[in-house]
Structures are given as structure tokens and as C-alpha cells.
Image (cartoon, rainbow, N blue to C red):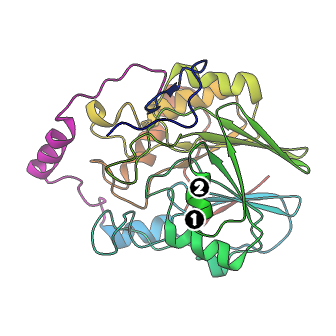
Amino acid sequence: MVYKNEFYDASKAHHTPHGFQNPEPVVRREGDFKRWQQERKQQGLPKPPQQGYQAFIEQWWQRPDFSGEQDAVWWLGHACLLVRVEGFYILTDPALSERASPFSFYGPRRKTPVAADVDDFPQIDYVMLSHNHYDHLDKTTIRKLIARFPNIIFLVPLGLKRWLERHGARYVEELDWWNEARLGDLSFHCVPARHWSMRTPWDKNRSLWCGWVMTHPNLRFYFSGDSGYSEQLAEIGQRLGPFDIAALPIGAYAPRWFMGPQHMDPQQSALFFTELKCRRAIPIHWGVFELADESLDEPPEILLEALEQQNISAHDFCAVKIGERIIF
């Protein structure tokens, strides 16, 4: 079946008549997914953390403390962060269900507990969504947020507004790459990412994927969303940086021949950190779901090696616990 893309703009490289695309060359071949699944099964991957799952949880998980009024950011696991700036609360990619899947009985199951459920949150004003994959856009979590905060405003890339409205959202701002939405003292820029989208066998790349830059007089924050590395992403820092803090992905990268185009590895994330010229970064997209072949505890170890190679202070780009808070 051939679809007409209602957002098609021939002047933009990431638009095509049949869906969205990355400006970078396509490197995946037919049969690659099946080959990856066979190889990881034969090799018994991913392996558990070195000291086991319970020890991993004890080392890398804590209950968040939302008290106080200081500007801060909490990493709540995977790609979910909560940002507080001047009393506003902004949430990113909340996927708080037991599985990253359309099914309750099948699909990647979380290996670390939910740090905070919707009932635990303070007043949420805005939600920034990067794309429609199940580990970033969770129907149950979205419905809970809308039920508790009916006036919540969603910032989404092209193609997701209708989905949000079907699930009860009243206020949705839908943007293309480099578009901006100004809402009071806050400004939201939709920025490029190197990824893809799909929730069913019939909607591949029918909605866009993105990162977000949120700015306030007191803060410039960059949320990468889900992205492979691309030299073109440096333009984000050139146009909208420098950033006070950035959330950059370091997980779901193995094997590189398969995951490389869609997920950064820690070395690429460290390089990207230098290109963004940001003051500090939080590693995200690790520690919750086993989406690729590396063990849960491998990304922060590899990141430390990459930071040393790039001459980056570990303080400036250090892995934090799920639930931990960084005060600006």
C-alpha cells in the first residue's frame, strides 16, 4: 500500500512523498534484522551485569526527591527526564510501563524499577516527545498524565499530534525540524536526530523523529531523543547552543554494524558533547531496557574511557543514578 505524506515538503531533505527519512545515506540491508536476532541468540546476548541485576539496581537506582524549588533536572531512567526551571516542570519521553511494547506479555521488559510513577510527579506543564517507538512513547503513561494533568501541553514532531489527540490530549504543538514554539518564558525548538519511527507494520517513518532544545532566560537544555551519530548534528550547537546541560544517549549500541545508524555509542556521544560545547551532560538511553547486545552496566564504563580519550572531565559528563537530581 502506498501512502500520501500529508506533511510532504519537497524543499526539505528529510521529507519524501512516502514518509520521512534521514539526510544520511541508508546503510541497512534487507535481512539485517534477522541476522542480528540469530547472532545474539547464538551468542546468548545480552549478558547480565557483572554482579547481577540486583547489584546493578542497588548501584544505579534510587527514589527521586522532588522537593525544593531550585532549578534542577532528574534522570528517571532510559530517556525520561524531569526538568524544573522557575517553577515550570518539563518531562521528556515518559515510558513508565513494565514493557517497551504494545503487549503486556511480550517485548523488552524493564530490568530496573520505575523511579517515579505519574502519581508521584509534581505538576507537569509540558511533555517533549522525540518519536513514537514504544520505549519513548508509552500509551499507558500518556493516558495517566492526561488524566492527572488535563491541561498539559505536548511538544511533538510531525505526525504525532493526531495520536495524542486520540488518547485525550487537549493541547499539542506539532513541529518540523528547526521549527520553534514559544510558550511564555519558554521556547521549544524541534531539532534533527538520526533515527526512524514505527509503531505498527503499516506506519514506518510516517511520523518524524527529533531532539528538543528548551530555552528559558535561566537555562538552555538540549534533549537528544534517540539518535545515531551524524556530523550534521553539530549544527544544533552552532545554531542554538551553547547549552547549560544536555541529555545525550550512550546505550543500545551493540552490535555496531546493526545499531550504528540509529544509536550513538559512548565514544560518539563523548565526541558529540565536545561539538555541542555544552557545560554538562547527563548520559541517557541506558540502564532500563535490554534493547541491544551490550550488558546494562557496560555503557557507563565505556563512557569513562571515552571521556579520558576526549580529555573531558568525568564531572562534566558523568553517569548518574536513575532517580538522581542535578541542581543547576
| Alpha-carbon span between mark 1 and mark 2 | 6 Å
Q: Which residue is mark 1?
A: 166
Residue 316 visible in the snapshot: no
- Residue at the spot x=28%, y=28% of the render? 28
Q: Is residue 189 above or below residue 96?
A: above
Secondary structure mostly taken by the magenta-highlighted segment of the chain: loop
Secondary-structure class at tag 1? helix
Q: Is residue 245 left or right of residue 36?
A: right
Q: Position of residue 239 (x, y in %)?
A: 74, 24
Q: Is residue 302 above or below residue 8?
A: below
- Circles 1, 2 touching at the beta carbon (< 8 Å): yes
Q: Which residue is mark 2?
A: 162
Q: Which three-letter amino acid code belongs to the residue tagged 1?
A: Arg
Q: Position of residue 248 (x, y in %)?
A: 57, 42
Q: Nearer the viewer, residue 73 or 6?
A: 6
- Is 86 contained in the magenta span? no
Q: Position of residue 171 (x, y in %)?
A: 74, 60
Q: Is residue 245 left or right of residue 166?
A: right
* Residues drawn in magenta: 22-51
- Residue at the spot x=54%, y=51% of the render? 319
- Residue at the spot x=30%, y=48% of the render? 294
